[in-house]
Image (spheres, rainbow, N blue to C red):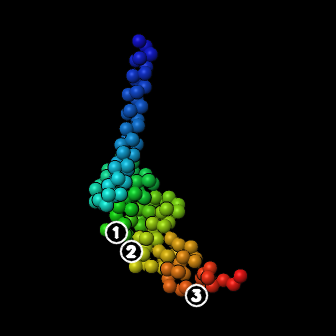
Amino acid sequence: MRIRVIAAFAAVALAALAWRPLAAWWCDDLGNLALAKGDDARAFDLFERGLALRPGSRLLLEDRGRARLDRDPAAALRDFQSAGCGAPCVAEMGDAEARLGDADGGLDRTHSQPERAERAGDHAAVPMKRDRQP
């Protein structure tokens, strides 16, 4: 009997402490599903709900930035900067900068030197396989 009471108390305490992170994770998963289906507005709302439960969550900030990238690139850029998630955020920041009119900033962040040259139209600066001598 005593063990059941302790186990019940532990379960209640765990649920009381862990419901917010679990609910935020659930919102993130549902938001990513909505984003994959092309429903950016629903995804944004779900990421907002998750951030209300877990303010400052890097995962939710990055995902909210992806959901608002087309609609509000400046706000998306702030989300990516706040998330600080490494290479994925750097690439997404480049996408946001490109949408804001800084095409060079977007290229610098998201592509390697050969890719930047090719995308910028400077094909002569990048030796292609067919141009190399044996």
The answer for how far apart the CA atoms under marks 2 and 3 are is: 27 Å
Could you tell whether 89 is left or right of 49 in the image? right
Q: For the residues marked 3 and 1, what is the alpha-carbon distance in whole angstroms? A: 33 Å
**Secondary structure of the residue carrying numbered label 1:** loop
Q: Are marks 2 and 1 in contact (CB under 8 Å)?
A: yes
User: Label 2: which residue?
Assistant: 99
Q: Tell me, yes or no, if residue 134 can be seen here.
A: yes
Q: Is residue 39 above or below residue 18?
A: below
* Residue that label 1 marks: 70
What residue is pinned by disc 3?
Answer: 124
Q: Nearer the viewer, residue 88 or 79?
A: 88
Q: Are marks 3 and 1 in contact (CB under 8 Å)?
A: no
Q: Earlier in the sequence, mark 2 or mark 1?
A: 1
Total number of numbered discs in the rendering: 3
The CA distance from mark 2 to mark 1 is 8 Å
Q: Earlier in the sequence, mark 3 or mark 1?
A: 1
Q: Which dot, 2 or 3, sits closer to the camera?
A: 3
> In the image, residue 112 lies at what x, y percent?
56, 73
Measured as percent of width and height from the top left, residue 127 is found at 62, 82
Foreground of the two, 131 or 127 = 131
Q: At label 2, which amino acid type do we have? A: Arg
Q: Secondary structure at mark 3?
A: helix
Q: Is residue 24 visible?
A: no
Amino acid bearing label 1: Asp
Q: Is residue 130 left or right of residue 35?
A: right
Name which residue type carries label 3.
Answer: Ala
